[in-house]
C-alpha cells in the first residue's frame, strides 16, 4: 500500500523526469508551485497523467476527479491519494 | 452465345493466362476449364441472375468458374477466405442460392434452398458482383456492383503484362487485376502466401512486371530485408493503394527498386479502381482519373462519382448524395489539380483541438532505427481529449523505456509537439490485416 509520502515521491519524480526530457533542465519541485509555471504545458500534463496511471495503478480523472481542479503538485498528489483510498 | 469478354480471350491462343502453384495455364487451358464449368452450371440449372458464392483459393480453376459465372450472367459472391465463423452470415446477407467450392476438387454448384429477392438484384440485367468490406470488427458491408459496368472499363488489348495478383477475388483490387490482365492478354501470377519472400520469389520465378500492393506490404518488404534477397529485375511498375503511403516507405522503396515506376491507385469496392497520375515517384500527390469518374471535395472530404459505382449495399444505406457522389470519408489536401489522401475522417486523432492523421505519425515512426512497423492511434486524455499513442514492432529486442525515449526524441525533431506520441508501447503482434492494410483498431 502506497502512503501519502510515496505518492508524493512518485509525483515529484515523474514531473522532474518529464521536464528533464522535455526541456533538458529541471530544478526542485515545490509542493505549491504552479504546474504550468514549472513548465508543464497541456501535452506534458497529459503525458504525466498517463505515466502516473502506469506507476500508481489508478487514473483519478477517469473516476470523477477533474483535472481542472489541479494546479499544483500538492493537488495532483491529493487526487491520486483519494483515488487510491476510495 | 459466348460472352464478348470470353470471345476476346479466344484470340490470345495459348499465351500464358494464369500461373497457379508454379503451373502455367494458357488462355486455351483457361477457356477449356471455363467450358467445363459452363456445363456444370447448366446441369444444375443456374439461371442468369442466380446468386452464387464462389469459395476457395485463387487458382486457374477458380478463375474459370468465375468466368463461367460472368458468361452465365450470374451474381457472383467471391468468398476466398471469409473471416472465421462468418461464412454463414455472409451467405445470409448475400442471399446465396448456390455454392461452388474449388479447393483442389470441384464441388457444386450446390443449391442452398434460399431464394434471393433483394431489390438491388433486380437491377442487374447482365450479372453482378457482391463484395464484402474487410471490417475486422462490427459488420461487413456488402456492395453490389453491375458486372457489365465493371467489364465495360477494360478497353481494347494494348499492353499484355505479367502481373502478380496480390489481392484475392473477394477484393475489388483482386477482381480488377484478374479482369484487366485477362482483357489485355496478359498473365496473372497468383501466390499461395502473401509473405514478403513468397511474393518476391514469385516475381523472380515468373518474371512479373507489375506488382499491385499496399503501402504496408511495401514497408514489410523493407523491414524484412526481402528486397535484397530476390531477383526483381523484371519488375517495371508497382501500384499501391487502399491506405495512405508513409513518406519514409515511399522514399526507401523507390531507392530499393531503381528503375521501377511507382503509382498510387485509389480504389474502393463501392466505386471501382480510379486511375491516377502521380506527380512524381516519391510523392504522395496524385491527380485522380477523370474517364468515367468525377470528384469533388466538400469540407476537406473526398466525394467521388463513378460510372461503375455500386448500386448500393445489401445491408446498409448507401452514402450517395443527390448528384450520385459517394462519400469516401477520406480527408484530402488539395494543391491545384493535385490531391493528397490524408486518411480516414474517423481515424483523425483530435489532440486539444489539433488534428493528427495516424499515417503522418506512422511515417515518422518508421524512420526510427530498429522500428519494423508502427501504428498510431488516439488514446483518451483528461487534459487534451486525446493524445497520440504509438505501438511499435521492433526488428531486434530492446528495452521498452529506451525505445520510447528514442521514439519521442526522433518524433520531437520531426513533428509538431501535439503529434508526438505521448505513449509508446512495444508489441510483437502483426499490425496489418491479411490484406496488408493497417489495423489501427487492433489492441
Image: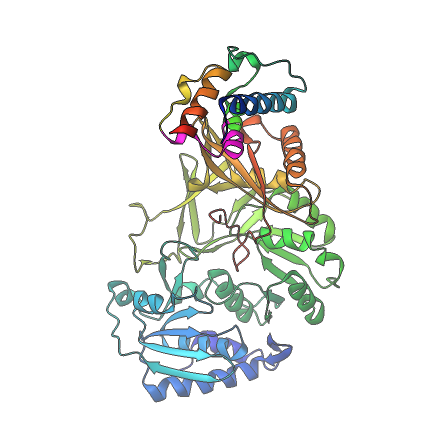
Residue B273 at what x, y percent from top left? 48, 56
Q: Give the vertical position of A39 relative to B304 (above or below).
A: above
State the residue at coordinates (41%, 88%). B39
Residue B388 at what x, y percent from top left? 52, 35
Q: Nearer the viewer, residue A3 or B284?
A: A3
The overriding secondary structure of the stretch rendered in magenta is helix
* Image quadrant containing the C terminus of chain A: top left
Q: Is residue B94 left or right of residue B10?
A: left
Residue B80 at what x, y percent from top left? 47, 69
Residue A61 falls inside the magenta stretch:
yes
Residue A21 at what x, y percent from top left? 65, 24
Would you say residue B340 is visible in this rendering? Answer: no
Q: Nearer the viewer, residue A5 or B307?
A: A5
Q: Nearer the viewer, residue B373 or B101?
A: B373
Q: Is residue B206 left or right of residue B343?
A: right
Instruction: Give the quarter of the image for residue B133.
Output: bottom left
Q: What coloring was used for the rendering?
A: rainbow
Q: Nearer the viewer, residue B197 or B394?
A: B394
Residue B58 falls inside the magenta stretch:
no
The number of callouts visible is: 0
Q: Is residue B286 left or right of residue B307?
A: right
State the residue at coordinates (30%, 54%). B316
State the residue at coordinates (56%, 83%). B28
Would you say residue B310 is visible in this rendering? Answer: yes
Which segment did they paint magenta?
A49-63
Instruction: Give the quarter of the image for residue B21.
Output: bottom right
State the residue at coordinates (59%, 51%). B215
Q: Give the vertical position of B177 relative to A26 (above or below).
A: below
Q: Give the vertical position of B257 relative to B50 (above or below).
A: above
Amino acid at each position: 500500500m502506497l502512503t501519502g509520502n510515496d505518492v508524493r515521491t512518485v509525483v515529484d519524480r515523474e514531473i522532474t523526469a518529464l521536464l528533464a526530457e522535455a526541456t533538458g533542465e529541471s530544478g526542485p519541485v515545490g509542493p505549491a508551485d504552479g504546474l504550468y509555471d514549472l513548465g508543464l504545458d497541456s501535452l506534458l500534463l497529459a503525458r504525466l497523467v498517463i505515466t502516473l496511471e502506469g506507476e500508481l495503478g489508478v487514473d483519478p480523472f477517469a473516476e470523477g476527479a477533474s483535472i481542472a481542479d489541479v494546479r499544483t503538485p500538492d493537488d495532483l498528489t491529493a487526487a491520486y491519494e483519494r483515488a487510491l483510498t476510495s | 452465345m459466348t460472352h464478348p469478354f470470353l470471345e476476346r480471350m479466344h484470340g490470345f491462343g495459348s499465351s500464358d493466362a494464369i500461373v497457379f502453384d508454379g503451373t502455367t495455364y494458357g488462355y486455351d487451358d483457361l477457356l477449356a476449364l471455363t467450358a467445363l464449368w459452363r456445363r456444370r452450371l447448366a446441369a444444375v440449372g443456374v439461371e442468369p441472375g442466380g446468386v452464387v458464392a464462389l469459395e476457395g483459393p485463387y487458382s486457374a480453376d477458380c478463375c474459370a468458374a468465375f468466368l463461367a459465372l460472368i458468361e452465365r450472367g450470374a451474381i457472383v459472391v467471391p468468398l476466398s477466405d471469409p473471416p472465421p465463423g462468418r461464412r454463414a452470415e455472409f451467405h445470409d446477407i448475400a442471399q446465396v442460392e448456390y455454392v461452388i467450392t474449388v479447393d483442389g476438387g470441384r464441388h457444386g454448384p450446390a443449391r442452398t434452398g434460399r431464394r434471393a429477392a433483394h431489390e438491388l438484384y433486380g437491377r442487374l440485367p447482365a450479372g453482378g458482383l457482391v463484395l464484402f468490406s474487410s471490417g475486422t470488427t462490427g459488420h461487413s458491408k456488402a456492395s453490389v456492383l453491375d458486372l457489365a459496368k465493371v467489364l465495360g472499363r477494360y478497353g481494347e488489348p494494348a499492353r499484355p503484362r505479367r502481373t502478380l495478383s496480390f489481392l484475392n477475388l473477394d477484393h475489388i483490387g483482386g477482381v480488377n487485376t484478374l479482369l484487366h490482365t485477362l482483357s489485355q492478354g496478359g498473365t496473372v501470377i497468383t501466390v499461395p502466401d502473401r509473405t514478403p519472400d513468397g511474393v518476391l520469389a514469385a516475381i523472380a520465378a515468373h518474371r512479373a512486371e507489375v506488382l499491385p500492393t499496399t503501402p504496408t506490404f511495401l514497408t514489410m518488404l523493407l523491414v524484412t530485408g526481402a528486397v535484397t534477397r530476390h531477383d526483381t529485375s523484371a519488375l517495371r511498375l508497382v501500384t499501391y493503394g487502399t491506405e495512405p503511403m508513409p513518406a519514409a516507405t515511399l522514399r526507401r522503396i523507390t531507392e530499393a527498386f531503381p528503375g521501377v515506376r511507382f503509382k498510387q491507385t485509389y480504389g474502393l469496392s463501392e466505386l471501382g479502381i480510379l486511375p491516377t497520375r502521380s506527380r512524381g515517384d516519391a510523392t504522395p500527390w496524385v491527380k485522380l482519373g477523370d474517364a468515367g469518374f468525377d470528384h469533388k471535395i466538400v469540407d476537406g472530404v473526398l466525394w467521388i462519382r463513378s460510372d461503375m459505382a455500386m448500386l448500393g449495399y445489401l445491408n446498409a444505406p448507401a452514402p450517395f448524395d443527390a448528384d450520385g457522389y459517394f462519400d469516401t470519408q477520406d480527408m484530402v489536401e488539395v494543391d491545384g489539380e493535385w490531391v493528397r489522401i490524408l486518411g480516414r475522417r474517423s481515424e483523425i486523432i483530435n489532440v486539444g483541438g489539433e488534428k493528427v492523421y495516424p499515417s503522418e505519425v506512422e511515417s515518422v515512426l518508421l524512420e526510427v532505427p530498429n522500428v519494423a512497423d508502427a501504428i498510431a492511434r488516439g488514446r483518451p486524455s483528461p487534459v487534451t481529449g486525446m493524445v497520440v499513442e504509438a505501438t511499435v514492432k521492433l526488428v531486434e529486442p530492446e528495452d521498452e523505456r529506451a525505445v520510447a525515449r528514442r521514439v519521442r526524441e526522433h518524433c520531437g525533431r520531426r513533428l509538431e509537439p501535439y503529434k508526438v506520441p505521448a505513449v509508446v508501447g512495444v508489441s510483437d503482434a502483426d499490425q496489418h490485416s491479411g490484406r496488408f492494410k493497417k489495423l489501427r483498431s487492433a489492441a
